[in-house]
Image (spheres, rainbow, N blue to C red):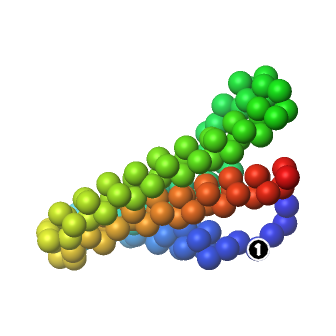
Amino acid sequence: MNRRPGILECVVAALMTSLVVLVFMQVLVRYLTYQPLAWTEEAARFIFIWLCLLGAAVAAQRGQHFVVEMAQHALPERAQRFAAIATRMLEAAFYGLLVVAGIKALRVVSLQQSPSLEISMGVPYLAIPLGAALMTAIAVWRAWTFWSRQQ
């Protein structure tokens, strides 16, 4: 499959690149000056959080999340279709709960500041509801396309 990367994939690639550059810079400065940069570890941690959650959305979009298909393939064809749609909807429900939990956490932590970067802790925590909302939309879309394709 030879397709152009989407916006989400480009964002994940940019985050990965910035994480590699930042950690390399941190190691290099520590090696050369024997003094670590105070902010790089925290920035790398926040970038990694965003990378994980947006990367999970990319994996959901590609259908690459872990799934056990053996039991589903043992079912009759009509039941396989139902199981596939039910699985996608259960995925969407779980991700929806993660959105709600992420928003609740965001309300609490947005009042705090990070120690080194002095930014709102809402910035890294925003990755949870945003990534989960993307995965919810993707799961619903995949269920809908599977259902409409089988009509």
| Front residue (pair 134, 112) | 134
| Front residue (pair 39, 64) | 64
Residue at screen point 22% across, 66% down: 107
Count of number-bearing discs: 1
| Front residue (pair 29, 42) | 42
Looking at the image, is 94 positioned above or below residue 46? above
Give the residue number, with chain letter if any, for mark 1.
4
Residue at screen point 76% across, 52% down: 147
Q: Quadrant of residue 66?
A: top right
Measured as percent of width and height from the top left, residue 136 is found at 53, 58
Crowding near the residue tagged with mark 1, few <14, some 14–19, many ≥20 C-alpha atoms within 10 Å: few
Looking at the image, is 36 positioned above or below residue 139? below
Q: Is residue 51 left or right of residue 100?
A: right
Residue type, numbered disc 1: Arg
> Which element is circle 1 on?
loop
Q: Is residue 43 visible?
A: no
Residue positioned most to the front = 151
Q: Quadrant of residue 12?
A: bottom right
Q: Is residue 36 left or right of residue 77?
A: left
Q: Quadrant of the N terminus?
A: bottom right
Q: Is residue 17 left or right of residue 116?
A: right
Measured as percent of width and height from the top left, residue 77 is found at 85, 32
Q: Quadrant of residue 13?
A: bottom right
Looking at the image, is 67 positioned above or below residue 146? above
Q: Is residue 8 left or right of residue 121?
A: right
Measured as percent of width and height from the top left, residue 18 is found at 47, 72
Residue at screen point 40% across, 59% down: 99
Measured as percent of width and height from the top left, residue 34 is found at 23, 63
Q: Is residue 140 visible?
A: yes
